[in-house]
Image (tube, rainbow, N blue to C red):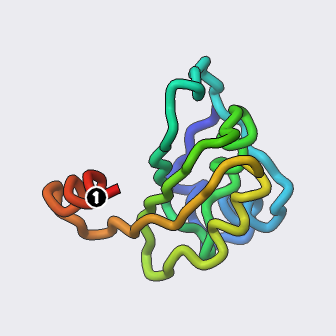
Amino acid sequence: KVPYTKLDLDWMNKKSRSSVEMSDKKYRPAIMKKEMDMSSYDEILLGFPIWWYVAPTIINTFLEAYDFSGKKIVLFATSGGSGFGNTVKELQSSAPDAVITEGRLLNCGTKQEISEWVNSL
């Protein structure tokens, strides 16, 4: 609901929005929920930037807003230097009846490389 600003994303500032959100794993930033019929999907590609070796908590908000039961969720991300870390473990409780798998970091992928990866799934 509230877009992130450059100041919000200043991870060096312990009082920035991103730092505050990530310091409390139970915190759920609000999203603008749109009506989506998840029943029409078997597999979902879910992308985000890695923050502190995990997905931002707003990704948990998204997963908790919809029913992903029986779905496969393949993660992709960007990162300034870390891998997925504990991302799958941290997200699983937000979509307990889905299969969440670590996909790929797409930091410097070309359009062709990304397309080939998606088509390989």
Tell me where residue 63 appears, x and y as whole percent.
Answer: 68, 43
* Viewer-nearest residue: 90 or 18: 90
> How packed is label 1: few (under 14 Cα within 10 Å), some, or many (20 or more)?
few
* Residue 74 versus residue 53 in the image, above or below: above
* Residue 96 versus residue 25 in the image, above or below: above
Tell me where residue 68 appears, x and y as whole percent.
Answer: 66, 39
For image coordinates 47% across by 52% down, the residue present is 47
For image coordinates 49% across by 61% down, the residue present is 49
Residue linked to disc 1: 120
* Viewer-nearest residue: 23 or 119: 119
- In the rendered structure, the answer to whether residue 20 lies left or right of residue 107 reads right
For image coordinates 63% across by 49% down, the residue present is 59
For image coordinates 77% across by 51% down, the residue present is 96
How many numbered circles are shown?
1
* Residue 37 versus residue 10 in the image, above or below: above
Tell me where residue 106 appears, x and y as whole percent.
Answer: 33, 65
Which quadrant of the rendered structure holds the N terminus?
top right
Identify the amino acid type marked 1.
Ser
